[in-house]
Image (spheres, rainbow, N blue to C red):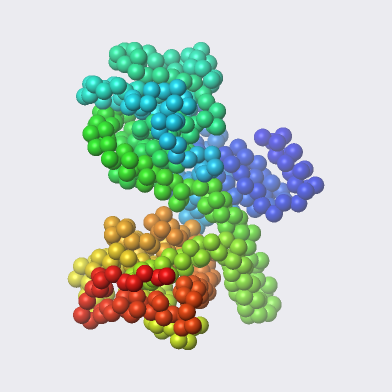
Amino acid sequence: MDEFTSFVSNWCRIYSYDLIHANFWMSGLVAAEIKRLMNIPFVITFHALGRVRRQHQGQADSFPDERFAIEDRIVREADRIIAECPQDREDLLLLYAADPTRICIIPCGFDPTEFWAINKVRARLTLGLPPDERLILQLGRMVPRKGVDTVIRGFADWQKQQDLPSRLLIVGGESETPDPQLTPEIGRLHAIAQELGIASQVTFVGRKGREVLKYYYSAADVFITTPWYEPFGITPIEAMACGTPVIGANVGGVKFTVKDGETGYLISPNQPEALAERLNHLFAHPHLISLFGRQAIRRAQDHFTWQKVTSAVAALYEEVLSVPEPLVATEAGLAILDQGFESMLRAVQRSQRLLRPAIQAASQAITDCFLRGGKLLICGNGGSAADAQHLAAELVGRFCCPHRAGLPAMALTADSAFLTAWANDVSYESIFARQVETFAKPDDLLLGISTSGRSPNLIAAFEAAQRLNLTTIALLGKDGGDLRTKATIPIVVPAQETQRIQEVQILIIHLLCELIEEQLLSASSDVEPFARWEPRLQAASEYSLDTHLPVPQTPYPTLA
């Protein structure tokens, strides 16, 4: 690594670089040395942590103890650390005393042009597999920590409970044919299958090219991955992108990507009996396989496409590169003013580049909500509570268009009597969720405003909205927090300072108002532009906070 560091530093003297992104601890060592020599900031994605590996593998871990000290140094000196999942972040905090303000959770992703759902029968015929068998898939590296033996034992237990034709397909290895000489783990696993009397139902197919993996994922009824631990794990996402439910170990990144009871199931590692029980339950309720498959596609598309991942990484780069220069001691007051304006302009410019699609999607969702007779519920805390009331006031009143009907928007932060009573008597964390459960109707939409995305009462409100199948929009900052993954449309301002986030959020609120008015205007071609949708909005706005009357459920006239 000393030789490689020398080579890279010489390269950086020839070509100018503003930022280094290192992957894995050895590259992180090089990046830290170059920062020391040339003051180039760096971002690190570890992908795996030495202390976590040692905890799970013990003496089987072949990496040297020196790795721990090097990782400690990288954690101290990195400008930003990308954690691939919440467990990764927790390990960095507990095992490496990492600075939480320099950790950002950004998952790995998949390419939608490489993985998509293929008709199951077509996929099986393409692979030469029987179309009528129950097919279980395990795909990944053939090493003991991946827990493939748990999959085989669980499959065997399940076979004892049913007698329909079933097959376990195991993809992976060092060669395109299953060779125990090149991949000793295959030999060990085959022996387990023979011992359990299911060798004829377990097929090892060896390593396969990425161009055919979507056929294997799509052909399977269920995908299984049960590692002892997993820093992230990309195969569950690929399986979900192909519409296949996943049964995964409740560890590391798997418990982040797989939603238990929604896109599959999570079980404890090394528990073949639990795996057999879940398989039995799924095939006893085949509608769940179809439902989980559809929800798996949606989750993969909503959170793990490369477009979303790389946008988040690009925003992180911008944050690192926009760290303000230290204030000069002279004329400090003017320097603060200039720095504030420049920091705000940078945040606005980054937001303009990164957030246009999300803002447009949010404005269209709100417009559609109003056109179908729904109302907008808005919530936030502190300054965000004021912003929620500001947005509601602009919509109920008017923004740019002087002669439009009022738009039914309700700030859940405005009823101080309810807020204080419920917070005092029950729980502050449920004040917004209680109102969502009380006021929300099927055509409504929830918009939450938070600079961090970690407010428990907003998270509870979004969970309540999910239970009611409402579309949700989250106006956020920093890394988006937990709300980022719970919102249908997250709008994450690419800034770290709370005041910069709030400034951009106000701009976004004004842009949403302007876009909504324009979209409603374009929905009608009459001389009186709002005449067609005004009856819908009038009906939807006949909702009283004092009397708690519901929105009328009579059908509205359709737009021409």
Which percent across, then down, holds residue 340?
A: 60, 74
| 183 vs 515: above or below | above
Pick the quarter of the image with the C terminus: bottom left
Residue 439 appears in the rendering? no
Location of residue 547 by image quarter: bottom left
Which percent across, then down, holds residue 137?
A: 39, 28
Which percent across, then down, holds residue 237?
A: 45, 41
The residue at 65%/48% (across/down) is 20
Q: Is residue 146 left or right of residue 356?
A: left
The residue at 34%/72% (across/down) is 557
Q: Nearer the viewer, residue 499 or 366?
A: 366
The residue at 38%/79% (across/down) is 534
Query: Which residue is farthest right?
Result: 14
Q: Is residue 496 left or right of residue 415?
A: right
Which percent across, then down, holds residue 57?
A: 43, 29
Residue 156 appears in the rendering? yes
| 510 vs 261: above or below | below
Q: Nearer the viewer, residue 158 or 132?
A: 132
Location of residue 268 by image quarter: top left
